[in-house]
Amino acid sequence: MASEPSTSTSEIQTDTTEPSQLEGTILNLIVAGIVGGFAISVDHLYAWYRNSHNESLLNETLEKGTQPDVGISEDKLVPRPVIVERLKKILLPHEDQSNYYVICGEHGTGKTTLTRIASREVGQNKKKGIQGGRGVIYVDIPADIEAFGEAFGKALNFTFEERISVTAQLRKKLLGDTNYEFKPKWKRAMKAFKRASAVYKKNNPCHQPSVIVYDNINCLVHKYPEIIDILQDDAKDNADDRKYIAVFVSSEDSVLRRMESRSSAWSRAKKPVIEIGDLSKEESMKYLTEKRKINEVDAKNIYELVGGRIVDLKTVADDFLAKQPFEVIKRQILMEVEEKFNTAQLLQKQLHHEVGKKAIRALLDSKELSFTTFKEFFNNYEEASKVLETNIFAYHPEKNTVSFQSQSVKCYIQEKADIFIK
Ligand SMILES: Nc1ncnc2c1ncn2[C@@H]1O[C@H](COP(=O)(O)OP(=O)(O)OP(=O)(O)O)[C@@H](O)[C@H]1O
Ligand SMILES: [Mg+2]
């Protein structure tokens, strides 16, 4: 009998070696599976740990409030207790509060300073050792959208790691998994705030909603007006649901006009809007003489030049104390005002000079005009609105009136009486 071809032996031999390679592969796969599975579990466990840690940090922040820095020492601060008390009432809403708020005022009237003071002090009871600011998140809005997200996150002490494990990030990167699409930071911060707000409302004994202050909201109006719309819609929905109360602080009329034009969302805004204006003469003199140690006579001259606009009082006081002669300071201020008149096209032979002059004369007589009266000096509503948008006149939404934008504007007009008055 012919012997079996040797190949079969080798085949048999091959057969005996194949299972061992297969086993090796399987073994490798099992080991890789175990190691991979373990790594994924560790990754998920770590992500879970980070998420719960961040979530508890978030809840703690809401519990304490943002506590923003006021940025000015007590010895330089003119107290404005009436406004601060009014703001504190807003920042301590009751359980059933169903409106959001809008605070406005010309540039540099002290809105940020007062809002920060109220955000820190609301609910404070020094005698009982109770710290103020509970439930109040304060966001100072920068003009850049990415920075807005960062600022929002910072106000909340939020780290932007929520619910994203390393494997999820890898899936997104390698497989383009869109389930893990990253939203803009401000939207993620907003979502986090809402989660923490629900916890805050449930846990505090009076079930008060939390408050979010969007300071300097006007920074978004030129490049990202649609974000203001989203924030306003959300403020309306959440006021309706008694979940959180929003407070918008703005230095520009355009924000107010945009918000007003959106009638459904505007219907939940508390009216009238709150306006923060200039210091009174008494407060201004107190600032200059007591806080800045300027003598009465010079203080009076400074007040007559810039009035009670705190940002201007501070700048002029700084220059004056740095030994700049008053006449030089005055010339500089009036030059700046002239530039504003130029931009507003109110100078001689410019587009709005003749109609503007009539409004100016009327305002010199009565200090404040109703918006309807002001409008009548112009050829049409658009023209009146356009001139009102410039920094010569100021609209006061609380009273629906118009005045000069500042004392320095009035001062400039008086200096140029031959052009504007005669
Ligand atoms: N009550 C006050 N006493 C002393 N200084 C103040 C007071 N309020 C504000 N200031 C100072 O005046 C300047 C302008 O204040 P602030 O930034 O609060 O104004 P604002 O209305 O928020 O300005 P903007 O409209 O530009 O946002 C700051 O330098 C601030 O420190
Ligand atoms: Mg401000």
Image (tube, rainbow, N blue to C red):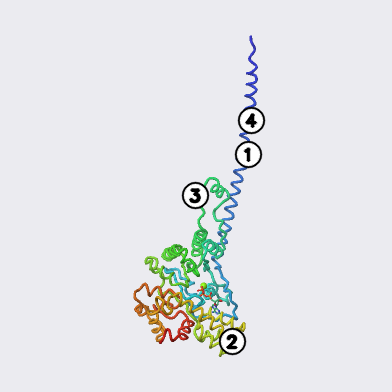
Separation of residues labelled 2 and 1 (CA atoms): 81 Å
Res 179 label: 3
Separation of residues labelled 4 and 3 (CA atoms): 39 Å
Helix, strand, or loop for circle 4? helix
Separation of residues labelled 2 and 3 (CA atoms): 64 Å
Left or right, residue 204 beside residue 372: right
Amino acid tagged 4: Gln
Q: Is mark 2 within 8 Å of ligand 1?
A: no
- For label 2, the residue is 294
> Which mark sits nearer the N-terminus, 4 or 1?
4
Tell me the quarter of the picture where residue 261 sits. Answer: bottom left
Res 31 label: 1
Q: Residues within 10 Å of mark 1 (few under 14, many from 20)?
A: few
Q: Residues within 10 Å of mark 3 (few under 14, many from 20)?
A: few
> Which mark sits nearer the N-terminus, 3 or 1?
1
> Which mark sits nearer the N-terminus, 4 or 3?
4
> Which mark sits nearer the N-terminus, 2 or 1?
1
